[in-house]
């Protein structure tokens, strides 16, 4: 320990000899020399100044403390007599003030300019959607008419191809569906409950 402390104080390497370092720190007779690393035993030592006043102990009346303890004991006895009441995990009871049907939120009063702007905007939107609907209906009508003319021309060419064209294509919208199997129930059959872990939390008051 002494060698390690001397190495740390003098910042000596680990491979260097420690004997000269000890001789420089200590005298030949083994007493500690007065160096920059060791102070004399007779030097004055001061402790850190106190930054706060020590707390003063309050005088407690033993009678008052005894009365507080008795009150706590009475309260504990009352709590032991009352059975514990379970606190519900989720409360779905709607407060009565929210079930009042007379509570109606009134519409905000808009200025005349804002109401006129909204009415004109709604009319413009209606005209746009009507034009869009007419264009879609016209496109659908043209497609149906072209399909009818193509089928008539195909029927003049070949009746077999015409019937094949009218047949629905099942691969156009692929859809696979497997319904439930209708099997008769087994008489006197009890389904097993299986293993489960009950993680329901229980609250006590």
Image (cartoon, rainbow, N blue to C red):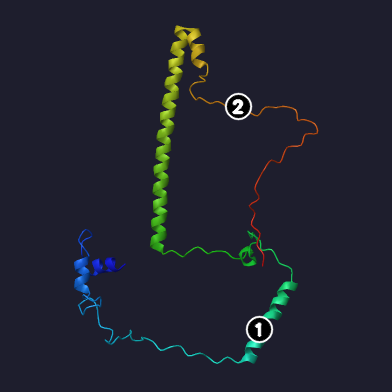
Res. 178 mark: 2
Corner quadrant of residue 99: bottom right
Observer-nearest of 161 and 125: 161
Q: Indicate whether 199 appears above or below 181.
A: below
Identify whether 85 is placed above or below 151: below
Q: Earlier in the sequence, mark 2 or mark 1?
A: 1
Query: In x, y percent, where is residue 154?
Result: 45, 11
Mark sitting on residue 69 = 1
The Cα atoms of the two marked residues, 2 and 1, are separated by 75 Å
| 105 vs 3, nearest the viewer | 3
Q: Quadrant of the C terminus?
A: bottom right
Q: Residue at x 21, y 58 (%)?
A: 15
Q: Quadrant of residue 61?
A: bottom right
* Relative horizontal placement of residue 192, taking residue 54 as reference (left or right): right
- Say which element carries label 2: loop
Residue 160 percent coordinates (x, y): 50, 8
Which residue: 39% across, 48% down?
124
Select label 2 or label 1 by which is in front: 1
Q: Residues within 10 Å of mark 1 (few under 14, many from 20)?
A: few
Q: Residue at x 52, y 12 (%)?
A: 163
Residue 118 numbered mark, or none: none
Return the x and y of residue 155 as percentages of the image width and height. Answer: 47, 10
Secondary structure found at label 1: helix
Neighbourhood count class around disc 2 (C-alpha, 10 Å): few under 14, some 14–19, many 20 upward: few
In the image, 169 versus 88, the foreground residue is 88
- The residue under the point 43% across, 37% down is 133
């Amino acid at each position: 320990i002494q060698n390690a402390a001397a190495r740390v104080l003098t910042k000596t390497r680990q491979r260097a000899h420690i004997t000269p370092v000890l001789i420089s720190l200590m005298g030949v007779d083994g007493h500690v020399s007065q160096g920059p690393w060791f102070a004399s035993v007779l030097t004055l030592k001061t402790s850190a100044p106190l930054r706060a006043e020590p707390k003063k102990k309050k005088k407690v009346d033993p009678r008052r403390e005894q009365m507080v303890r008795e009150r706590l004991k009475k309260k504990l006895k009352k709590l032991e007599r009352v059975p514990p009441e379970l606190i519900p995990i989720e409360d779905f009871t709607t407060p009565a003030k929210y079930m009042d049907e007379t509570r109606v939120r009134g519409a905000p009063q808009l200025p005349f300019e804002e109401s006129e702007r909204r009415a004109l905007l709604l009319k413009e939107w209606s005209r746009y959607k009507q034009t869009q609907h007419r264009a879609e209906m016209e496109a659908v009508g043209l497609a149906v008419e072209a399909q009818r003319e193509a089928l008539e021309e195909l029927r003049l060419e070949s009746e077999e191809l015409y019937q094949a064209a009218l047949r629905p294509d099942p691969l156009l919208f692929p859809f696979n569906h497997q319904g439930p199997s209708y099997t008769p129930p087994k008489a006197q059959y009890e389904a097993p409950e299986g293993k489960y872990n009950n993680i329901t939390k229980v609250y006590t008051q």
